[in-house]
Image (cartoon, coloured by chain):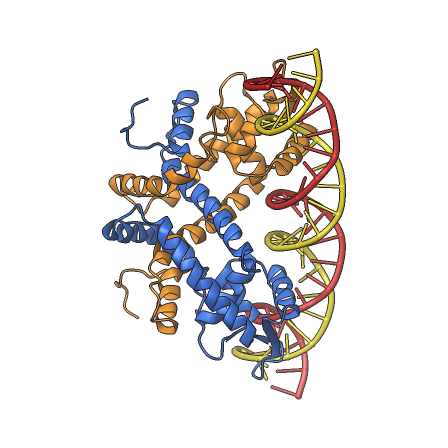
Chain colours: A blue, B orange, C red, D yellow
Amino acid sequence: MTFSRPAEDEVDRLVAAWRQERPDLDVSPLEVLSRVSRLSRHLERERRAAFAGQDMESWEFDVLTALRRAGKPYELSPGALLRATLVTSGTMTNRIDRLAAAGLVTRNPDPEDRRGVLVRLTEAGLAQVDAAFTDLLRREHELLAGLGQEERQALAGLLRTLLVPFDASAENGGAHSSSGRT
Amino acid sequence: MTFSRPAEDEVDRLVAAWRQERPDLDVSPLEVLSRVSRLSRHLERERRAAFAGQDMESWEFDVLTALRRAGKPYELSPGALLRATLVTSGTMTNRIDRLAAAGLVTRNPDPEDRRGVLVRLTEAGLAQVDAAFTDLLRREHELLAGLGQEERQALAGLLRTLLVPFDASAENGGAHSSSGRT
DNA sequence: CCGGGATATCTCGACATCAAGACAGCTAGA
DNA sequence: TCTAGCTGTCTTGATGTCGAGATATCCCGG
């Protein structure tokens, strides 16, 4: 094996195998979508390992950053949080329970809607999320080291094109207050 | 709101919020990596919904396609399967148990290594995976409708660059037999 | 003012995943 | 040949997530 072939990834091998087995099908969509799935899985694994060092779980981080982004007073409804993190309502209730038990958020009644609840970051929560976020950015910056500035922008733009249809259909939801998964 | 602004996605909003709250940080990595995570999550949700129509779970599909890709006799070890699907060994044992109970695979002793097992697709498994895969490709093709041929290739290439370091470090694993997540 | 439908959150049970460790069998070197 | 270490698979217990449904409240039209 020489040294200079443009590096192959697992998806290249996977696609080649499919072309062998099913030459009748156009498997080219996998070149993009399979890479998105696999990359996401690797990223998730990295995040998990990295957060483990600072007593922080990946799911905690997702919720806390959504609150942090919202700005003072760092307060969002469970509904806004579940739209931001793309989980179901049952999952979010459970997450809030545990974050509250850990003292990172408080759960307060919404003065304007008696069905509602407002989840607010505590001092401790704010401190933890700021530390973890700074750290995450540093690590993610390294993951992108292989790409130049222009390439990153191109990549971001292409991904946005794929993402817009999904985020648009969820648009109605709730006053598109905040949202997004870090 | 006019109609022609270049469409925004949730990540644009998320990044804008961070720039407001933490102008001291360079959050540009999120433009790429947050989109990868969110897109993957949306794709997963789509797949789940789509497969539900044909008595097929997303995790079953992942395992069956890995076997299908391997070519006749559609047989791989649990180890190869877990590397292909990026799950842990305990998860794979559990998956194989359930697939075998459903009659989609059989579990046979490896004649060359008495610790080993070979998982093989049954006729029923082969039929199911071929049907599901054809269907998946059709749907994934539609998801990419927003991009032209050249854009897809560019996107695939950029993602490969990010993926190579991960897949390379796993390279040693097991005779890089097959692998890949569909 | 009332009823019906929408919305916000929570409850509950099923289930898939992970992490760590148990164990049998392989393999290379003394 | 024996042993030490490695590999491949399975076991176990904890945990997070989903999906469906329950409940309370809101809001609009009549």
Q: Quadrant of residue A90?
A: bottom right
Q: Quadrant of residue D12?
A: top right
Give the residue drawn at x 29%, y 27%. Answer: A3
- Residue sitting nearer the eye, B22 or C8: B22
Give the residue drawn at x 46%, y 29%. Answer: B172
Report if residue B129 is visible in the image. Answer: no
On the image, the x and y values in percent for residue B179 come to 48, 30
The number of callouts visible is 0
Give the residue drawn at x 58%, y 42%. Answer: B52
The correct choice, above or below, for A9 with respect to B74 in the image is: below
C30 sits to left or right of B2: right
Report if residue B100 is visible in the image. Answer: yes
Q: Quadrant of residue A18?
A: top left
On the image, the x and y values in percent for residue A8 come to 35, 32
On the image, the x and y values in percent for residue A62 come to 51, 61
On the image, the x and y values in percent for residue A72 come to 46, 79
Image quadrant containing the N terminus of chain A: top left
